[in-house]
């Protein structure tokens, strides 16, 4: 379809979402304001119960961010200096950053060429005497290959954390993201499939001892007021953010359905000109991003932005090539799939509220770029 005018799209349309749910969101916030329970108010435990039930685990612990969710999970397992944690190099820095913050060493394992999630076939060779656990990132909204990863971990006696910061609501063989391994974590950053209006996160587990420990660690290691058993952090979820999430959670299943529909529509319109997201037949995706692969990424990105289509690159450099991790001693070429994907990945505008006309415009511009040579 040819367009004789130029649209100007939002990369993520949070304004339309707020306007649609405004009454519910405002009511939930007002209840917090009227209660004046701004820190660890009743909305926290209400949200924790709702989301734990949704994921299918016994415990949900609200925390201050997705980053702190991973950090607290590692702290609960007692990760310390000298330990090693396996994770992929193609992810947001938070995944490996918290490992380093605890004095442990990130041990990178390359990703699968199709799903962009950690490649289970490469994990076992990286497990050593110092390996304590695996962080499996469920990138772009599709759950990692958790059965294979869990199986390896069980044989080796190590734990598994799913970094589900982009996949909350997605399913893997009928089970929900964050409820499959020992511990699952997610982020409620505003752009996430379930996002608040600031920072927030949650840890999920069936392990009562881990849950109890994280609940203490998120409030400075406190068990009773001013009685501190552990060295912890200020890692609490804000009550107003919990209220916003309660309101938005009521609409999550419908939003996921819309995300799947919009993702499929993009793929149908683009599959013959770029590499569109690959989906395992037993998975669903929440399309936290809609990301394509192209060997003309920079030119396409500039062309789209010039024509009112904002784009983003998640992520332009894998972690092993970031200066912050230079001390690990990795070099270019060590993780070829991650490096290849980082050079070609490009995310297009995506939200449950993007219209078909807007998608047609994006598809038309992408196709037009390749048609023009």
Image: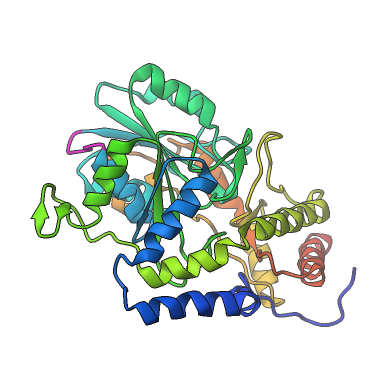
Choose top left, top right, bottom left or bottom right for residue 77.
top left
- Secondary structure character of the magenta stretch overall: loop
Number of numbered discs overlaid on the protein picture? 0
Residue 365 seen in render: yes
Residue sitting nearer the eye, 269 or 178: 178
Q: Depth check: 134 or 1 in front? A: 134
Q: Residue at x 82, y 82 (%)?
A: 5
* Residue 114: % across, % down: 63, 38
Return the residue nearer the eye: 236 or 314. Answer: 236
Q: Is residue 49 above or below residue 189?
A: above
Residue 99 visible? The answer is no
Residue placed farthest to the right in the image?
1
Q: Look at the image and tell me in which quarter the N terminus lies.
A: bottom right
Would you say residue 178 sits in the magenta stretch?
Answer: no
Residue 226, percent from left and from top: 10, 59
**Which region of the structure is painted magenta?**
77-82
Image height check: is 361 above or below 51? below
Q: Quadrant of the C terminus?
A: bottom right
Along the line of sight, which residue is nearer the eye, 342 or 216?
216
- Please tell me which residue is depicted at 59% across the width and 56% down the height of the picture: 288
Query: In the displayed structure, would residue 66 be above or below residue 26?
Result: above
Place residue 307 in its image quadrant. Answer: bottom right
Q: How is the image coloured?
A: rainbow
User: Residue 305: image x %, image y %?
Assistant: 65, 73
The spot of residue 227 in percent (x, y) is 9, 54
Q: Which residue is located at x 68 percent, y 72 percent?
A: 309
Q: Residue furthest top?
A: 155
């Amino acid at each position: 379809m040819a367009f004789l005018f130029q649209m100007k799209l939002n990369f993520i349309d949070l304004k339309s979402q707020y306007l649609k749910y405004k009454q519910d969101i405002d009511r939930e916030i007002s209840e917090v304001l009227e209660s004046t329970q701004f820190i660890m108010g009743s909305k926290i435990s209400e949200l924790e119960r709702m989301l734990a039930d949704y994921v299918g685990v016994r415990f949900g612990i609200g925390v201050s961010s997705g980053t702190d969710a991973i950090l607290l999970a590692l702290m609960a397992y007692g990760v310390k200096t000298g330990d090693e944690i396996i994770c992929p190099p193609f992810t947001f820095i938070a995944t490996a950053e918290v490992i380093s913050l605890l004095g442990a060493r990130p041990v990178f394992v390359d990703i699968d060429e199709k799903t962009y999630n950690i490649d289970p076939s490469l994990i076992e060779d990286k497990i050593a005497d110092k390996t304590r656990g695996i962080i499996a990132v469920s990138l772009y909204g599709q759950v990692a290959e958790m059965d294979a990863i869990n199986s390896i971990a069980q044989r080796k006696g190590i734990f598994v954390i799913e970094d589900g910061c982009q996949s909350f609501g997605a399913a893997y063989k009928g089970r929900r993201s964050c409820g499959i391994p020992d511990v699952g974590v997610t982020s409620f950053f505003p752009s996430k499939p379930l996002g608040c209006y600031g920072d927030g996160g949650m840890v999920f587990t069936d392990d009562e001892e881990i849950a109890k420990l994280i609940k203490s660690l998120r409030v400075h290691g406190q068990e009773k007021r001013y009685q501190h058993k552990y060295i912890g952090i200020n890692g609490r979820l804000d009550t107003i953010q919990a209220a916003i999430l309660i309101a938005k959670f009521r609409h999550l299943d419908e939003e996921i359905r819309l995300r799947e529909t919009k993702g499929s529509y993009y793929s149908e319109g683009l599959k013959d000109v770029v590499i569109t997201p690959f989906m395992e037949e037993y998975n669903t995706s929440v399309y936290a991003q809609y990301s394509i692969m192209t060997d003309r990424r920079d030119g396409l990105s500039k062309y789209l932005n010039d024509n009112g289509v904002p784009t983003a690159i998640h992520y332009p450099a894998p972690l092993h090539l970031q200066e912050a991790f230079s001390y690990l001693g990795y070099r270019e070429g060590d993780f070829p799939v991650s490096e290849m994907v980082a050079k070609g990945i490009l995310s297009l505008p995506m939200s449950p509220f993007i219209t078909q006309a807007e998608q047609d415009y994006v598809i038309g511009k992408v196709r037009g770029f390749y048609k023009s040579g």
